[in-house]
Image (cartoon, rainbow, N blue to C red):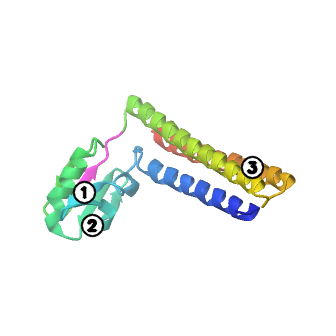
């Protein structure tokens, strides 16, 4: 791999780590209803684990309520079971065609737990970013050994990888701070 390929690979993988963090943070409960809360919930339907967002529409009719309308009304019971088993602490209200989820206000203790989870997810993303940095540095060293890169080019690539690492760690921190703020809002 030449320098550009190494840097492109590192940047793509770091971007993916950030997008995974965004997805995970969307699933963290705040005081407000958000489709991200149940989007990635897996439902046992037709003998397969299926993401909820592929078998139903999820709407937010009120700030503290989610409305789940399955495309096939026969899947209502399966969706209800998945919500109860998810550990979200929400009780589905089934009217035969839709499921309503009332999002109760969060207690201070629950908010602290949520903030702790946000920080855990952020740290996991930063660890992934650092592992990507390590892999990129190894690729640069290998390219230098194979005489694809000169010693100076190798150093330059490693410096650029470090700059990318700082940039993406900062993005992770900003995402986490923003989500923490949302969780702590009363």
> In the rendered image of this protein, does residue 135 appear above or below residue 181?
below
Q: Is residue 22 visible?
A: yes
Q: Which residue is mark 2?
A: 55
Dot 2 crowding, Cα within 10 Å, few <14, some 14–19, many 20+: some
Q: Which residues are magenta?
A: 100-105
SS under mark 3: helix
SS under mark 1: strand
- Tell me if 142 is positioned left or right of 93 in this view: right
> In the rendered image of this protein, does residue 46 appear above or below residue 109?
below
Residue furthest out toward the top:
109
Q: Nearer the viewer, mark 2 or mark 3?
A: 3
Residue furthest out toward the bottom:
71
Task: State the separation of the CA atoms marked 2 and 3.
Answer: 42 Å
Q: Which residue is mark 3?
A: 163
Tell me the quadrant of the picture where the N terminus can be found: bottom right
Dot label at residue 43: 1
Say which residue appears at 61% left-offset and 60% top-offset: 12
Say which residue appears at 61% left-offset and 49% top-offset: 132
SS under mark 2: helix
Tell me the quadrant of the picture where the C terminus can be found: top left
Say which residue appears at 84% left-offset and 52% top-offset: 151
Residue 166 is situated, as x and y percent measured from the top left of the image, at 70, 46
The residue closer to the viewer here, 169 or 145, is 145
The image quarter containing residue 52 is bottom left
Task: State the separation of the CA atoms marked 1 and 2.
Answer: 9 Å
Q: Earlier in the sequence, mark 1 or mark 3?
A: 1
Task: State the separation of the CA atoms marked 1 and 3.
Answer: 41 Å
């Amino acid at each position: 791999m030449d320098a550009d390929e190494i840097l492109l690979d590192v940047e793509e993988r770091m971007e993916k780590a950030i997008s995974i963090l965004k997805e995970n943070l969307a699933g963290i409960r705040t005081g407000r209803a958000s489709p991200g809360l149940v989007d990635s919930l897996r439902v046992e339907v037709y003998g397969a684990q299926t993401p909820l967002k592929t078998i139903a529409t999820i709407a937010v009719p009120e700030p503290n309520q989610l409305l789940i309308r399955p495309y096939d009304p026969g899947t209502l019971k399966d969706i209800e079971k998945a919500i109860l088993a998810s550990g979200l602490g929400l009780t589905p209200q089934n009217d035969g065609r839709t499921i309503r989820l009332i999002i109760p206000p969060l207690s201070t203790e629950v908010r602290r737990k949520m903030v702790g989870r946000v920080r855990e997810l952020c740290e996991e993303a930063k660890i992934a970013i650092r592992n990507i940095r390590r892999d990129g540095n190894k690729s640069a060293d290998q390219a230098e050994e194979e005489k694809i890169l000169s010693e100076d080019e190798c150093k330059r690539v490693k410096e650029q990888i470090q700059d990318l690492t700082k940039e993406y760690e900062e993005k992770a921190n900003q995402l986490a701070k923003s989500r923490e703020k949302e969780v702590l809002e009363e």
